[in-house]
Amino acid sequence: MSGNNAHFAQFIQHRKQKNWTRNIGDKLRKAGVTLLVFVFCFMMVIPFIWTISSSLKAEREIFAYPPQFFPTEVTFDNYLIVMGQHERIRPQVSLARAYWNSIIVTIPGVIGPLVTAILAAYAFARLKFPARDFLFFLYLVTMIVPIQVLIVPQFMLANALGIYNTHWALIIPYLSVAYAVFLLRQSFMSIPQDLIDAAKIDGAGHLGVIRHVIVPASSATIAALAILLFVWRWNDFTHPLIMLNRRDLYTIPLALSALIQDRENARTGGLLAGTILAILPLFVVFVIANRQFIRSMVHTGVKG
Amino acid sequence: MATIRPNLRRAEIKPEQPKRSSLRMKDNVAAYLLIFPNMAVFFLWVLLPVIFTFFLSFTEWNFLEGIDNVRFSGVDNYRNLMDDPWFTDSMINTTLYTIVVVPVTMALGLFFALLLDKQVYLPVIPRILIFIPYITSPVAIAAIWMTLFSPNWGPINVFLFDTFGIEDPPTWFASSTWALPALMIVTIWKGIGYNALIYLAGLQSIPESLYEVAAIDGAGWWTRFKSVTLPLLSPTTFFLGITGVMTSFRVFELVAVITQGGPGTSTTVIAYSIYRAGFSFYRMGYASAMAVIMLIIVITFTYVQWRIQQRQTRFMRD
Amino acid sequence: MNNLSRRLTVMMVLLSLLIIPAVSAQDDVVTIRFWNADTSGATEAAIEAWNSDNPNIQVEFVPYSNDDSGHTQVDTALLAGQVDAMINFGIQRVDSRARAGLFADLSELLPDFDIVEEFGTESTTYGDAVYAIPAGASFFMTYINADAFAEAGIEVPENWTWEEFIAIAEELTTGSGPSTRYGAMLPTWPWMDEVAAYERGWDFNVNVDACTTNFDDPIWAEVATIRYELETVAGAALPYAEARAAQLVQQNQLYGESVAMIISGTWILRSTQNTVELPRDFVTTFAPVPSLTEDGFPYRSGKFDDFMAVAANSDHPEEAAQFLAWLATDGYLFYTEKGRFPAWQGFDAEVVAEVYFSGFEVPAEEILDIEAFIRVALDNTRPLAPQQELLGNAELQTIWREEAVRVFNGELTGEEASANMKERGDRALASLCD
């Protein structure tokens, strides 16, 4: 990708110049195309719009026939129910608690692997040591191992280490994310050796080089990786399912799946409200950082 | 385009020139210390479990009984797999799911990429819209689509009934015919945004001049698409193909939350079979044998794809 | 260089600190972690009563979900020693855990409490050991919207066969498309195997000695076909697969007047009491589960359901067992108030009924037919069938579910499904037997 960047910038420049000479007709056509593109992309999010609208409805209105897209009367009851704030209806899990838990595991789940991966990727990219390529090959192979293969041994390990059913069980395993090492190594290898040599002449050790040269030079990739890690940790379902058993430790996806099972108390409205609440933080992060995010997907995105 | 191909050669060109062996020793120690935190967790948490799973696949073991009660059973598990409908059906379902989901998602992703490549006002908004499904957790997606596809007059069936007058709409997740297609629809919907953005990046790296040359030759839109766009996108297509297959083979959450493999065995996929054999039937050895087969398939496929891509890239360079 | 090593060492020490297990403080007061999937509020009330009477044995309620992922969590928690006492729902859960040695022998922990005698069943006895207290039983019956029957001019029968039931359900079905009101709704799992059990006994489906199944017995085709005729041929009941996919809840369908009657277990009584969340303007009346023959079932239509057990690796097994012994007897009335029925033979039916009616928000006679309730729900003229032989139970249950569902929707005939079940079931057992 990087080789094309110069080309790409030139190409954008070229288009911009053409823009100046455009007349009204072109603008109208652009507006038409915009409308078309918006309509198509909007179709993709209709399920979300429907979910938001239904989560604001009273329970019996959700499946009313004939169907209504918008609620006749907006109610926030469903949100109160899943946040555990409703006076009568108490589902088995409260998303309020789950939010907190998700935050607790997500923040170290982003920072931890970033730190260890930066150190390891630096070594893999810029140092030569025995068995380097073999070790890196191991990382690559295990990147494609499906999680179901690992859950039982991982449960036994967590139990043996005494971290089973604690949030540590969701943090420690993720201190090593093979994909992060792979991605950062690619990025670190493209940093000119001159920069590193210059830092070394100034007396910097490896950590100094990492801090003053490597990290600043790869900040875009690191930021992108941080966002990806955030999404993966926030949405992780299988791991918490095996590692946690107490409701007060549940993360958002687990709490949501408990709500799906608890139809009697949560009901459809509560479930839909819970869904919206679960998506909300990611949505906010994505809107704020969408440039970084799209860049990261474009540059990388080996994992689904 | 990033690929999962390890670029080992480039690093080898500029190794740090060791002047004295003690310095090299020191550097080796430093390197090992740097990789240690990551490597330790990696060995403990990934490599060890993989090896253990491989070992378990030759045993009979109920994990409730503890590690002391592992009984060696040779290749029995692998032999039993071959005529177990849970395994064969789940292989068929997973393959079918992959064969449909991967190309359709890629085709629709390309369609949306072509749309997004157009000059529009506020280009960031359609990009955000199209990408939301991809960042949403599978559990939330399951919750939404279970409700939308509700056979008991959920929104989709009401729409089919009111708009097209379909009196007898499919019952989706309730029907052994429609459950797998419904899962495919959900997966495709989730994956379009990702495929579209990767394709978009590919499209934008195609030099405009190539299109201009083609236009001078009098090529129409379709010819230009066929002779310029598609060939130049082929690395992207290979990349999306690999990642798509790897993701499809692992599908688990949607099945675990929505259908639990049913009705009948119609949505029993391999990852779900493994989970159920281990945790519901308490046959961990058997589950491990399935896991090993799954692993071999995924690795073989990735390797073959990688080789094809390498040949293709070489071909294009020449 | 030294600098680097030092910093990395510090980092590794910090990392390793993360994995040192927390050490819990010891106290004179014993805490029992009690796992239960109950959502009625009864568990909290019972524990509050126990804790105030027993300051030295404090019980803590740990809720779990009674579904596949919930049970995986229970299993791993049991292995990790995070459970002291628990309630299992269904004998098969007890069986797999007891056989794996996860439960303590209650006959040792409670030498003065003869569980077999007090509860009248040996289903949790393994050799000399008793691994669970069968504290509660659930019974199946038909919950009926009396107004729907009156409007259709049908009298609520005291006994009926499936043939009669299907005919009545057909008459009660009104409307079409989205506004259909079905005559009936069966449980949201394949369930018809339980009908076979009321006829033949719960220990029917496995030939233990030969290590084969009885899935070729004609009764399996018969019961599966009944549901097919009711739901698919007559269109008189809300189809199984739809209820399942839409996650419909039986009580909401009955009290939302989307169906005229449901066949379900005694736990629905909690919703029958609940006129606040489920308002309605009809009286609920009751009839037995329709039988296969004119003579009715030889066994009572129900089974032991709440099995209380102590974890083998609990630090306080005696205290946990004491708590359970109370909860299974006097303490069980907290559950009865919410609609669950005790299996302890020390209660008499009238006390149970009285406690049950005391849980109502409005006078009981206004919302249910008390005479029919006592006649159907508390009928103990027939015995509960002996419990099933559990060899390969999870696999056999899954096979039955997969094949039965294909009969319900008309993909297979009962006979074809029965042949498939026999073949698959025997193979599953064969790999377990040797």
Image (spheres, coloured by chain):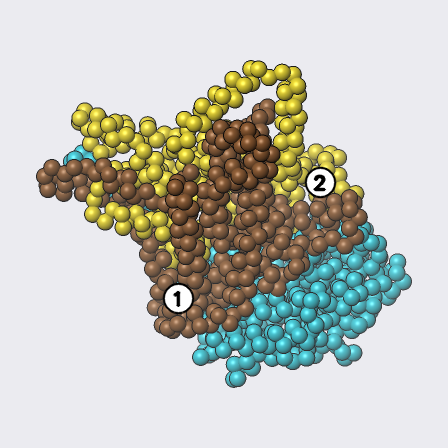
**Discs 1 and 2 lie in a common subunit:** no
Q: Colour of chain C?
A: cyan
What residue is rendered at 41% in x and 45% in y?
B315
What residue is rendered at 51% in x and 37% in y?
B228
Label 1: chain? B
Q: Are marks 1 and 2 in contact (CB under 8 Å)?
A: no
Amino acid type of the residue that numbered disc 1 sits on in the rendered structure: Ser
**With C419 as the anchor, is B160 left or right in this view?**
right
**With A298 as the anchor, is C19 left or right in this view?**
left
**With C88 as the anchor, is B15 left or right in this view?**
left
Tell me if I can see residue C395 in this picture: yes
Residue B270 versus residue B1 in the image, above or below: below
Residue A286 versus residue C304 in the image, above or below: above
Which residue has dot 1 on it?
B57
Q: Colour of chain A?
A: yellow
Name the spot of residue C392 as percent of width and height, x first: 52, 73
Q: Colour of chain B?
A: brown
Residue A1 in which image quadrant: top left
Spatial CA distance of label 1 from label 2 is 51 Å
Amino acid type of the residue that numbered disc 2 sits on in the rendered structure: Ala
Towards the viewer: C14 or B293: B293
What residue is rendered at 78% in x and 73% in y?
C161
Towards the viewer: B56 or A184: A184
Name the spot of residue C65 as percent of width and height, x first: 55, 55
Which residue has dot 2 on it?
A58
Determine which of the numbered discs, if any, sits on residue C195 in the image. Answer: none
